[in-house]
Amino acid sequence: MRIARLFRQASLLGRLLSAPCALLAPTVAFAHGADQVPGGWSFSAMTVIPLGVVLFLYTCGVARLWWQAGAGRGVTWRQMSCFVAGWAALGLALVSPLHGLGERLFSAHMIEHEVLMIVAAPALVLSRSFGAMLWAFPPSTRRHLAGGAHWAFLRMTWRSLSEPASATVLHGLAIWLWHMPVLFNVALASEPVHWLQHFSFLTSALLFWWALLNGRARRKGHGASVFYLFFTSMHCGLLGAILALSKNQIFVGNDSAAPRWGLTALEDQQLGGLIMWVGASAFYLAAALILAALWIGSGSSAKKKVGGSASSVRD
């Protein structure tokens, strides 16, 4: 009976995770310069291996947890759906033809960055996948890894970095520094630097969204999160406006694909700026409005509870 139940759960889990796995279906080639396959797919060891390891650990962890606790317990279906969406978004940004096109088209490069920061990062944060991945390890290893989180130095460092203000500043620095022409052009010319650029965008975005959705800001009622999302929307809009309204070509890419799309290099840069100005800013602002609604709603609920308790006492 229990074996049959495990088989059904594993089969269902496999079907749910099979869709994003299709992103990595073609044969992988790891050599730099040989990581492009027909159709524009990009397969670099620096990208494929971390994606594969994360997927493997998460799948094993959820399977083991559900074997012991039952399907949907410990890791909810909603959380697993968020992980699948976030992991698939990473594959879209880093492996699909969008990545290869982004090296030759500034607007595509901008879309790639936005997918990392405003799609993949919040989805992965909402999935709370780290706890599930811990379950992929044996109990003894799991205890040691969990115990490491209680080290004073790590706790102090994490507490400092995960403060909403700190996380917002770090995320903003990553966005602005990597859009300095010197650093941006070096990233396009060097695969390791390009990987570092994407890594800093993703990690700073994960920290930013975690601080606002799961950290102290949430426990305080989302009020601070609304402010920091609004601030991020404003400075992203400013950077996008600078790029969109510039009359000079700031970024000089090699082998630009802009003419193939009927654009000049300057128009491609302006389109990329417009994507950040309107698209990214609108997303951060929409997230701020959603959290503001939740904040107001939670405050109204608390008042109703207080009022109901007071009425009960008077009665």
Image: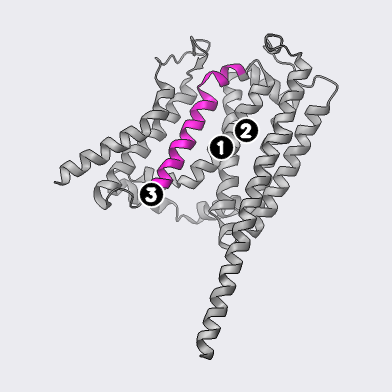
Marks 3/1 in contact by CB < 8 Å: the verdict is no
Q: Which mark is residue 114?
A: 2
Mark 3 is on which residue type? Thr
* Real-space CA distance between mark 2 and mark 1, rounded to the nearest whole angstrom: 7 Å
* Real-space CA distance between mark 3 and mark 1, rounded to the nearest whole angstrom: 20 Å
Q: Is residue 93 magenta?
A: yes
The residue shown at (59%, 30%) is 198
- Vertical side of 150 occupied by 99: above or below: above
Labels 2 and 3: the sequence-earlier one: 3
Where residue 248 appears, x then y in whole percent? 84, 20
Q: Residues within 10 Å of mark 1 (few under 14, many from 20)?
A: some
Mark 1 is on which residue type? Val
* Real-space CA distance between mark 2 and mark 3, rounded to the nearest whole angstrom: 27 Å
The residue shown at (70%, 13%) is 258
Query: In the image, is 125 to the left or to the right of 56?
Result: right
Residue 136 seen from this side: no
Q: Residue furthest right?
A: 247
Query: In the image, is 190 to the left or to the right of 309?
Result: right
Query: In the image, is 101 to the left or to the right of 176?
Result: left
Q: Quadrant of residue 256?
A: top right
Please name the predominant secondary structure of the magenta segment in the image: helix
Residue 119 seen from this side: yes
Q: Secondary structure at mark 2?
A: helix
Q: Secondary structure at mark 3?
A: loop
**Residue stretch rendered in magenta on the structure:** 76-101
The residue shown at (57%, 26%) is 195
| Mark 3, residue position | 76
| Mark 1, residue position | 119
Marks 2/1 in contact by CB < 8 Å: the verdict is yes
